[in-house]
């Protein structure tokens, strides 16, 4: 998946360079690489290429946005203590800040987490 993301970024940057958005030097280099005669020969091929480019880029941007939105919602739920309250329903949301500092360090501090509902953390 990460290779596909890098590949898509590369393709996007290549197309931006092809259209001249990244400077004249890169535009000239991309013209040397691509076979312009084949693309100029058919307006249908040019239209299909443009539509395919837009569809692939739209799909990529949509999936990337959905991925970041999912990560953002998980980070928000984690910072608000929703995930803690789901995992340890008997510990109480009011103890989230204390749990954030002490949970997972394999030490017993006693107090509100020394219960069966909090798994004796």
Image (spheres, grey):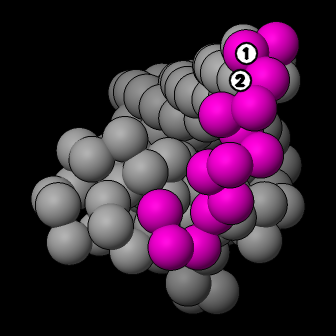
Query: Residue 86, position in %: x, y?
Result: 73, 27
Q: In this view, does 57 lie to the left or right of 68?
A: right
Mark in front: 1 vs 2: 1
Q: Residue 13 occupies which quadrant of the picture?
A: bottom left
Q: What element carries label 1?
A: helix
In this picture, which residue range is highlighted in magenta?
31-44
- Indicate the quadrant containing the N terminus: top left, top right, bottom left or bottom right: bottom right
Query: Residue 89, position in %: x, y?
Result: 73, 26
Q: Give the CA distance from mark 1 to mark 2.
A: 5 Å
Query: Residue 120, position in %: x, y?
Result: 74, 63
Residue at image x 77%, y 71%?
A: 3
Q: Among all residues in the image, which is located at the extreme bottom? A: 106
User: Looking at the picture, does residue 49 appear above or below residue 19?
Assistant: above
Query: Residue 7, position in %: x, y?
Result: 69, 64
Q: What element carries label 2?
A: helix
Does the magenta-highlighted stretch encompass residue 71? no
In front of the other: 38 or 106: 38
* CA neighbours of label 2 inside 10 A, class few (<14), some (14 to 19), many (20+): some
Residue at image x 37%, y 41%?
A: 19
Residue underneath mark 2: 46
Q: Can residue 37 be seen in this view?
A: yes
Tag 1–tag 2 contact (CB < 8 Å) = yes
- Indicate the quadrant containing the C terminus: top left, top right, bottom left or bottom right: bottom right
Residue underneath mark 1: 43
Report how many numbered discs are placed on residues in the image. Answer: 2
């Amino acid at each position: 998946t990460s290779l596909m993301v890098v590949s898509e970024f590369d393709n996007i940057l290549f197309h931006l360079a092809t259209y001249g958005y990244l400077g004249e030097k890169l535009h000239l280099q991309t013209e040397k690489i691509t076979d312009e005669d084949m693309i100029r020969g058919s307006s249908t091929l040019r239209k299909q290429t443009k539509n395919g480019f837009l569809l692939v880029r739209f799909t990529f941007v949509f999936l990337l946005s959905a991925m970041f939105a999912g990560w953002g919602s998980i980070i928000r739920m984690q910072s608000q203590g929703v995930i803690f309250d789901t995992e340890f329903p008997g510990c109480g949301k009011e103890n989230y800040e204390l749990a954030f500092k002490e949970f997972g360090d394999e030490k017993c501090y006693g107090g509100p987490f020394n219960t069966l509902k909090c798994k004796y953390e």
